[in-house]
Amino acid sequence: MNGSPVSHHITPVRTYVIIFLTLLVLTYTTAKIGEIELGDWNFVVAISIAITKALLVILFFMHAKDSSNLTKMFIGAGFFWMMILILVTLCDYISRPWQSNPVWMR
Amino acid sequence: MPAGRDVALTMASEDVLHSFFVPAFRLKHDLVPGTFQHMGFRATKPGRYHIFCAEYCGTDHSGMIGWVTVMTPVDYANWMAANGGSGSMVEQGERLFQQMGCVSCHLSNDSGRGPTLNNVYGHPVQLEGGKTMIADESYIRNAIIYPNLRVVNGYKRDIMPNYQGQISEEGLMQLLVYVKSLSEPSKTPAAAGKAGARAAAPAASPASARPSSPAPPARRPLQQ
Amino acid sequence: MADSPVTIEHGGMGPDNSLQEQFDNSEQQYETSTLGMWAFLLTEIMFFGGMFGAYTVYRFKFPEAFASTSHWMDLLLGTVNTAVLICSSFTMAMAVRASQMGKKKALIWFLIFTLILGGVFLFIKGVEYHEKYVEHHIPGPSFQYEEAAYAHTAQILFFLYFAMTGLHAIHMIVGVGLLTTLIIMAAKNRFNANYFTPVENIGLYWHFVDIVWIFLFPLLYLIGRHA
Amino acid sequence: MSTVLEQPRVQQPVNYLNANYGWKSWLLTHDHKRIALLYMFSITAFFFVGGFFALMMRLELLTPPGDLVSSDTYNKLFTMHGIIMVFFFLVPSIPAVLGNFLLPIMIGARDLAFPRINLLSWYIYMLGGVFTMWAVVSGGVDTGWTFYPPFSTSYSQTHVILAALGIFVSGFSSILTGLNFIVTVHKMRAPGMTWMRLPLFVWGHYATAIIQVLGTPVIAITLVLLGFERVLHAGIFDPALGGDPVLFQHLFWFYSHPAVYIMILPGMAVVSEVVPCFSRKRIFGYEFIAFSSLAIAVLGFLVWGHHLFVAGESMYSAMIFSFLSFAVAVPSSVKVFNWTATMYQGSISYETPMLYAFGFIGLFTIGGLTGIVLATMGLDVHLTDTYFVIAHFHYVMVGGMVMAYMAGIHFWWPKISGRMYPENWGRFSALLVFVGFNLTFFPQFILGYLGMPRRYHAYAPEFQVLNVLSSAGASVLGVGYVLPMIYLTWSWFRGPIAPPNPWDARGLEWEKSPSPPPTFNFIERPIVTEEAYNYARPAEVPVGG
Ligand code: HEA
Ligand code: HEA
Ligand code: CUA
Ligand SMILES: [Cu+2]
């Protein structure tokens, strides 16, 4: 990680083009699937596709694939902390109805 | 308020956050506008205890104080007899139910334009789209002020008028108590009173043991 | 926003391309600036995270109102915009590549493409905002909503829509400014195969903004169209 | 000890203070040490403004009825006291002053990774300060430092947006400081300075920086939403329009609970330096202290719900938050026990920094333990929003962090100014602060337990005695804080010249760098060959010192 002279891994154009086309295809797919009725699965599919796209951008366009473990850790920490914020807050809202009749009111 | 008896409070606020705090009971709970909040206790010793508003609510936050008077059950019965004037919350709710025209659609069976409200509270309700949920207080509340938020299965949306802004918090509370009274007694909470910390007139209790002597909802004293 | 001076500073370069005093060598300087940029993006994630949190809570609380408002989103424009941004990310990646190889001309052209695509995105966004304006869907005193039952909740959801896309658009505008600076710097021969840190870092920023949109698109336009 | 060199210098060697002169050389400096001094002057000013508001409050609370100021004024007093003390004094206090000054020296770097960002962060901080002071002089804010809606969005008629803007802006300064620290620690360490050789001061600041970078953006966005809500009344936090005020509280405390660790970890970092030096011993359990800092930073993000126990939060969430709050006690106690173990069988001497460090350990423990009391859900129902909470957080923030700040300022004063402070005055005011502090805030525990709610302008007469005690304590405390102002100013110009290592301490800043350090900190690049706190060997003398 340290000490080597300035030399950077240069990604071949081919990779960029493949990723680019994949992203476009995924965009089209997710828009089309959005028009089909899948119930709760719409959400799952849309989010999974979004995560896939984001991962592709991070790994290839942002060169995370060739970055140090430290950088990878930073990225992981960012998303992890955001999930703490969202999910733990949501837990409160999900569990509020569970207690709408407190024990002592029965 | 009688000593030795369970008391349940259902609290609401019309403006900002307040908090109902009786240090002697070691209890407090915030009043969150837009929701009902609950609290319950059993006072054991007769006496006069401070009520404070504990959630900062503006200019007169420190002025929102009052007393809760705990009496022996006998004294309490006498006091109720002397002061229990304007009818119980259930009665007031029933009156409102007629005044607002709810009766025209909600009959004692499902023959009206709307579903019957008998045995709704505390029971599961089938909603449009097949989901079910237990009709709790906030369900009833939302059913009145946002009828289309959750629509009962088999009924069309947009039939029931939207009462948002037309019923005061106090009126909502009375309707709620009335709707509750239409359910089997075993399911209804032992009591529903309401606490408005501000309302505490020196000797009267702001929290009523039975659905009676309602107090106006907490309101920020000066502004509004 | 505090972004722009920050990101330029992450380039880590003084007026000339010399090494700054606090570093031992240019390798250390390069790694440090990129790491700084990543740390900055970390705070950006949390910055948007607060809004995503609010979004999640209200979506959970008002699924029906949500379904109702998502019909007012222009799916076509949203999809086109997603594609535009992905194209711009691609050209940006190519620009970084060109700068790594020291190809000045290619670098400038790719940056210009990226800039144009960013402009197209903002234009389309403007068209959408105009639609909302005409429909009285901008939160505030003039807000009106078609379904009375969701009059209030819909306003909250449109507020979130504007807050999220608006913050994203502000980031785009900052990005456009940064790209312009890059183009000028590139034209002045500031970069070479050994020194291209600002291109790399602004590239990271641009991709990050793209990723935010990759999530905004399904959340605002797709999910709930049927419920 | 403190063998003060009295021999007059013929000519002071070039250092960061006399390298160049003129306001430009200060206001446009990239030198982390000068920026640290800029911060020091600004936060001191804010501290006295905040302290002035505190004194006004204590004066009002001498008597039960609200007689001195109107209730609106009182509400503004505690709001502005809270905002200024938290966001403009305590959050930047140790990190931006001592951290800025020492962190690069301690790891053997010539400067922080991004010196210009460092300067920028000071300007951003000052800009935020200008907005906030503008809000203060144009009439004040009365929402409480917590800005709870719907009061803050729909009812308050004061300058809420301006104050929120000030906090929003200054937040970026905090973020940039943290970002700078993280990158610096990762990339700028001197040869041989491995992670396990870092002074604990650096570990503490690294952990703080994590919170600054990950937490602060959330309050920024929350305040933006609040501001727009206040203008547009779109309803996002307004229950009258279907919104949820508790959501604001979640977002607010997601930052503000971790932020209390921004306000304590740097204090622990300072104490971890002071204690081994004045006990003449290697710190006990180095790894445990280092990792407990990280543990506090991470766990700190999982407990925010303990501020919402009675706010309408779900009971189940509350239970989990309560439990996780207990978990934070574990790393905190690791630290307390390790400091104690370091002192055990050490040869302790009682210089001013050590006195403050003693104060820190004792008062933080009381503050922390009462935090555990509050984190117990059932007890919090009674104690929340009473003076018990006020006492709890003043014990940790004033008894903890401000004490640690004073300890640090005295400890590194010779390094910062190149001069010694008067030891006996130092000891005397440390004692005053300790006595005054306890007199002010201990009665508040009792008040809270008896049920006196906080943010009360007028209170029930039965609470008067304790309130008078508290106000009396505050005046002692005030004197205790004004004294150091005076003698440190004196020392800056007239104090005896300090040797490079007056405390015979270990660490690069003492052993490799003169007092005051030159612009790039070291005459020659230090190379580290051993663990920190090696008090077993004699101290080295820095080149050029
Ligand atoms: C520097 C700031 C700081 C610090 C470090 C802490 C530390 C802690 N705080 Fe505090 N807190 C505040 C600042 C701080 N707090 C502020 C400002 C508020 C009020 C905000 C407002 O409403 O305006 C507040 C409010 C507050 C509340 C809400 C009260 C209410 O409003 O109802 C709670 C509840 O859980 C709480 C808990 C804790 C806990 C569990 C810790 C723990 O981290 C403490 C851990 C430390 C120890 C436990 C001591 C050392 C350990 C030992 C000696 C070992 C032995 C101990 C055990 C085995 C238990 N705090
Ligand atoms: C870093 C944080 C910090 C610090 C250092 C302090 C310091 C002090 N605080 Fe603070 N306090 C808070 C943070 C802090 N506080 C917060 C967050 C709140 C909650 C606000 C809210 O509810 O929204 C609060 C609330 C609060 C209250 C409760 C108000 C209420 O709820 O009604 C009280 C009451 O006694 C109080 C007192 C004090 C005192 C006596 C000091 C003393 O330590 C101060 C000592 C300093 C001095 C005395 C200054 C000396 C200066 C002079 C003597 C010169 C002055 C003259 C000129 C200006 C020329 N504080
Ligand atoms: Cu405070 Cu009502
Ligand atoms: Cu906390």
Image: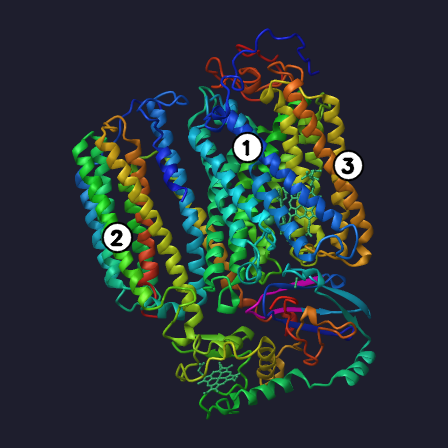
Residue D6 visible somewhere in the drawing:
yes
Label 1 marks a residue whose chain is: D
Residue D517 lies, with reference to residue D130, above or below; the image says above
Write the residue at 28% across / 56% down: C125
Query: Residue D187 falls in which quadrant of the image?
Result: top left
Label 3 marks a residue whose chain is: D
Assign the C terminus of chain D to one quadrant of the image: top right
* Highlighted range, magenta: B27-39
Residue D39 numbered tag = 1
Q: Secondary structure at mark 2?
A: helix
Q: Secondary structure at mark 3?
A: helix
Query: Residue C30 falls in which quadrant of the image?
Result: top left
The residue tagged 2 is C121
Residue type, mark 3 in image: Val
Q: Secondary structure at mark 1?
A: helix
Residue C133 lies, with reference to residue C121, above or below; the image says below
Residue D144 image point, x, y percent: 61, 53
Residue D60 left/right relative to D42: right
Residue D67 left/right relative to D533: right
Nearest to viewer (mark 2 / mark 3): 2
Assign the N terminus of chain D to one quadrant of the image: top right
- The answer to if D21 sits in the magenta stretch is no
